[in-house]
Image (cartoon, helix red, strand yellow):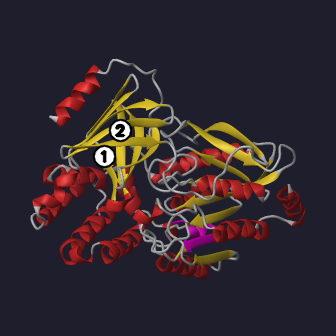
């Protein structure tokens, strides 16, 4: 009855509210219980919505349906047995959530309901302007923000490249904005920064999928070309700072453009296959050791198949057999939240044969590093549960040493996670509740290295003067 009543209220709501923007991130908390994080995006047929529940270790689970009309919002997730009805009013969505016939008030907010200590707000002590530029070759219009120490003079610059998944220019993750904090720090230290929304995200045009890292690299190439033609940028001192998968993209772009330096943040230093297998091992060791014997071999075979099989139809047939064999060993109830075994298998095969994921598992940064002679800085945190510091810094070290590379630095940061947050354990559920967005030690390491290795004496004096402002 409760569900019928709330649906009736949704469709008969008489007080219409003027249309407002629902896309973006929203944060809520059930009374005295877990936090709910909502990510709403535009889709070809309306909207899509993803849900994170950090306390339950549930991330990026998709709502079955989302309806938004005249200020009213309706969400449904069959696997969690959630239904939500509410109305949007500026920076809040107020309503009721029903879970297993239990009804509770729930208000979503635009800002996270957890403390943040690195808040970047207007007015800035530097020049900041929203800009647009075209992706190289595909000519997709991309939107971003350029920050510079001043409107006068010429400055070194860095393009920030996000990691996997469609992300905005701040690389926003669970209420944190690491690229905003990084851009603010670098600009205060005299370095111009261009950060931009991924294609099909935020204010950028185009579609995020289907595409591969090579397509996204063309977007970054367009950002570099924009800076090369900017009157206030030193064209020979344009660098790339890539986080995670962005650390794959940065060396790729550097084979096409004259890049001054690379900053690789939690980036793979080995093949993506080897990196993913190590990540898989860490996940089972830290989050599901009881499932290792049953599940690890299955996922290892999936990843190896993706890396070794080029033909898409052959890969699909191989994965179909692998998933059928593995799922026969797993109880049905473990797939309830995913909508059942068949739905889970269908979505997994679609995901693991996508253009992006197939390309990703066949990518090896060591194919590109031999072409790099510019200064390189690579940083990893020792609490990174996604790209393990030891494996990947060792990978960079072996390759760069074998090449006799003239100028590189590898840094392993203590008690820092994949997103460069100071942390205790490094697991993903911890991210939302951490107060600090970007390690101050990491920020100073990056800006100090750029000053020391990229600029000459004249530029260094300019940087010092800009930093005093």
In reply to whether residue 171 is colored magenta, the answer given is no
**Mark 2 neighbour density, 10 Å: few (under 14) some (14–19) many (20 or more):** some
Residue 379 sits above or below residue 317 on the image: below
| Residue 123 occupies quadrant | top right
258 left or right of 389?
Answer: right
Q: Which quadrant, please, contains the N terminus?
A: top left
Residue at numbered disc 1: 62
Looking at the image, is mark 2 or mark 1 earlier in the sequence?
2
Residue 18 sits above or below residue 336 on the image: above
Residue 81 % position (x, y):
21, 46
Residue at the image point whose x is 47% and y is 39% from the top: 200
Mark carried by residue 97: none
In front here: 452 or 92? 92
Residue 242 % position (x, y):
57, 59
234 left or right of 312?
Answer: right
**Mark 1 neighbour density, 10 Å: few (under 14) some (14–19) many (20 or more):** some
Kindly indicate whether the residue at mark 1 contacts the one at mark 2 (C-beta within 8 angstroms): yes
Residue at numbered disc 2: 48
240 left or right of 152?
Answer: left
**One can see residue 143 in this view:** yes
In front here: 374 or 50? 50
Residue at the image point whose x is 49% and y is 69% from the top: 268
In front here: 201 or 416? 416
Q: Which stretch did the figure color magenta? A: 367-380
In reply to whether residue 372 is colored magenta, the answer given is yes
């Amino acid at each position: 009855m409760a569900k019928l009543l709330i649906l009736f209220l949704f469709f008969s709501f008489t007080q219409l509210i003027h249309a407002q923007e629902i896309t973006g991130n929203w944060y809520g908390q059930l009374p005295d219980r877990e936090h709910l994080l909502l990510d709403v995006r535009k889709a070809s047929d309306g909207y899509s919505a993803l849900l994170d529940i950090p306390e339950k270790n549930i991330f990026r689970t998709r709502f079955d349906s989302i309806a938004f009309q005249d200020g009213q919002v309706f969400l449904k997730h069959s696997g969690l047995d959630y239904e939500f009805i509410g109305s949007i009013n500026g920076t809040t969505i107020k309503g009721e959530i029903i879970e297993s016939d239990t009804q509770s008030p729930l208000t979503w907010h635009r800002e996270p309901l957890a403390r943040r200590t690195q808040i970047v707000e207007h007015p800035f002590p530097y020049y900041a302007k929203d800009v647009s530029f075209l992706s190289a070759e595909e000519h997709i219009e991309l939107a971003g923000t350029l920050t510079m120490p001043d409107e006068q003079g010429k400055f070194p610059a860095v393009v920030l490249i996000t990691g996997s998944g469609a992300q905005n220019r701040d690389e926003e993750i669970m209420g944190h904005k690491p690229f905003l904090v990084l851009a603010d720090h670098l600009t205060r230290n005299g370095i111009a920064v261009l950060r931009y929304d991924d294609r099909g995200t935020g204010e950028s045009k185009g579609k995020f999928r289907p595409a591969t890292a090579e397509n996204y690299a063309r977007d970054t190439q367009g950002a570099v070309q924009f800076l090369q033609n900017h009157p206030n940028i030193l064209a020979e001192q344009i660098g790339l700072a890539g986080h995670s998968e962005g650390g794959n993209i940065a060396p790729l772009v550097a084979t096409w453009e004259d890049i001054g330096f690379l900053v690789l943040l939690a980036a793979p230093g080995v093949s993506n296959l080897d990196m993913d297998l190590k990540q898989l091992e860490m996940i089972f060791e830290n989050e599901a050791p009881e499932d290792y014997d049953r599940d690890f071999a299955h996922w290892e075979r999936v990843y190896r198949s993706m890396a070794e099989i080029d033909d898409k139809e052959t890969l699909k047939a191989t994965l179909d057999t692998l998933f059928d064999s593995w799922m026969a060993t797993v109880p049905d109830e473990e797939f309830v939240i995913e909508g059942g075994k068949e739905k889970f298998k269908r979505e997994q095969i679609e995901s693991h044969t996508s253009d992006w994921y197939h390309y990703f598992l066949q990518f090896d940064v060591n194919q590109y590093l031999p072409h790099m002679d510019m200064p390189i800085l690579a940083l990893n945190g020792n609490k990174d549960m996604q790209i393990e510091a030891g494996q990947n810094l060792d990978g960079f070290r072996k390759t760069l040493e074998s090449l006799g590379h003239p100028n590189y630095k590898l840094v392993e940061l203590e008690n820092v996670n994949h997103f460069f947050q100071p942390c205790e354990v490094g697991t993903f559920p911890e991210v939302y509740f951490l107060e600090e967005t970007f390690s101050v030690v990491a920020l100073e390491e990056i800006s100090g290295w750029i000053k020391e290795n990229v600029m000459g004496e004249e530029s260094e004096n300019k940087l010092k003067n800009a930093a005093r402002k």
